[in-house]
Amino acid sequence: MNNLSDVKIVAIGGGTGLSTMLRGIKRFTSNINVIVTVSDDGGSSGVLREDLNIPPPGDIRNCIVALADAEDMLKKLFRYRFDCGMLKGHSFGNLFLAAMTELTGDFENAIERMSSVLAVKGHVLPVTKEDVNLKAVLKNGNQVFGESNIPKVCISENSAIRRVIMEPKGAKAFGRCVDAINEADIVILGPGSLYTSIIPNLLIDGITDALMKTKAKKVYICNVMTQPGETDGYSAFEHVQAIERHSAEKIVDICIANNEQLDEKTLLRYLSKGSEQVISDRESFEKSGIQLIEDNLVYIDENDKVRHDYIHLADIIKTIINSN
C-alpha cells in the first residue's frame, strides 16, 4: 500500500506495553482503533470502578495519552498521579474520565471528550460496555477471582495458570470493536501482560469470531521479559500457544519477538524479581507455519525498565504492511 496513512490498523490489549507501542504507530498514521480490556480491578482504576460503577479507566487513559497530539504539559497533567491526601494513588486522567462519565452519562462519550481535549490520533474503544471480571483456573486446581489477584496468587501458591475465564460468560463485544476488526488491514495483539491484558479481550463474545473472519494480517508482539505469576519460563511460541488455547488455532499470522541479548546487570536485576528474557523457539514457529520476525526491540527507559523500542517496532510494522 503506497500511502501508509490509509492503512486501517487495529491494536488490541491493555497496560503499559500497548500504550508504548502506540507512540510509534501514531508517527505514521491516525487511522487506528485501539481495543482495550476493561477487566482491571486494582489500583486507582479498581477503586473508581467499585465506587462509581464505571469501567476501569486506567488502560483507556494510558492509550489516549499515548495517541495524544497535545502539548507535553497537557499530557503530563493527564498522567499526573496524586501522592498524598484522599486522592493518593489516583491519576488526574482517571478522575477526568470518571467525572466526564458522570456528566455525559456514558463511558464512550467520556472517552471521546477526553480524546478531543488531547487531540488524539485515532480512536480508543473499550472491548465491552458490560461489567466483566477475570477468573483464573490454576494448574493446582484452585480458582482465583480478580485480575489484580491472579499473578500474586500464582506466585504464592507456586502454580501456573491453566486457563483464564471472563465472567459473566457471554459478555458482548462493543459493536464498534467488531466493525473495526472487520474493516482492518492489520490487527496487532500486544505487547502486554499475556493473561491479564491481551487474552481477556479474546474472551469477549464476538472478538475471536471477528479475528477469524477478517482478511487482516494478525500480528502478535511478544514481551521481551517473562512476567512473574503469568508467563514464568514461557518462550515466544508458548505465548502464542496460550493465545490460541483461549481463542482459535491459526489466529496469529506473524509473531514479532526480540533477539537482542540483554546485558548481565539488567538480566540479574530482573531475575531477582523472578523475571527472565523470553527466547523465541524458532524451530516451533517454523513447524507451526507462523511467521517469526526477530530483531533488536529493546529500549531501557529512564527507570531502568526494559521496554519495546516503539520507533523500531513501528518500522517493522510498516514493513509488514508494505509487504502485504
Image (cartoon, rainbow, N blue to C red):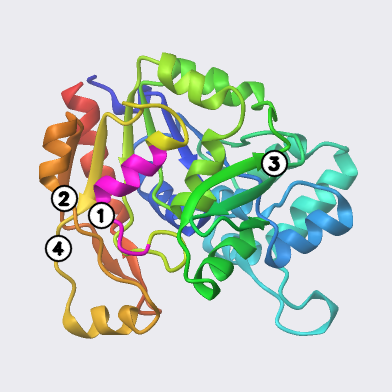
Assess disc 4: are there few (<14), some (14-19) or many (≥20) residues with their C-alpha within 10 Å of its C-alpha. some
Left or right of 266, for residue 57: right
Residue hosting label 4:
260
Spatial separation of the CA atoms under disc 2 and disc 3: 40 Å
Assess disc 1: are there few (<14), some (14-19) or many (≥20) residues with their C-alpha within 10 Å of its C-alpha. many
Residue hosting label 1:
235
Quarter of the rendering containing residue 264: bottom left
> Contact (CB < 8 A) between labels 2 and 3?
no
Spatial separation of the CA atoms under disc 2 and disc 1: 6 Å
Residue hosting label 3:
111
Q: Residue at x 25, y 40 (%)?
A: 255
Left or right of 156, for residue 222: left
Q: Is residue 198 visible?
A: yes
Instruction: Indicate the secondary structure of the residue bearing disc 1.
Output: loop
Q: Residue at x 20, y 21 (%)?
A: 324
Of 22 and 288, nearer the camera is: 288
Spatial separation of the CA atoms under disc 3 and disc 4: 37 Å
Residue 46 position in % (x across, y down): 74, 60
> The disc labelled 1 sits on which kind of residue?
Ser
Pointer 4 or 1: first along the chain: 1
Start and end of the magenta stretch? 232-243
> The disc labelled 4 sits on which kind of residue?
Glu
> Contact (CB < 8 A) between labels 3 and 4?
no
> Contact (CB < 8 A) between labels 2 and 1?
yes
Pointer 2 or 1: first along the chain: 1
Instruction: Indicate the secondary structure of the residue bearing disc 3.
Output: helix
Spatial separation of the CA atoms under disc 4 and disc 2: 14 Å
Camera-side mark, 3 or 4? 4
Pointer 3 or 1: first along the chain: 3
Residue hosting label 2:
281
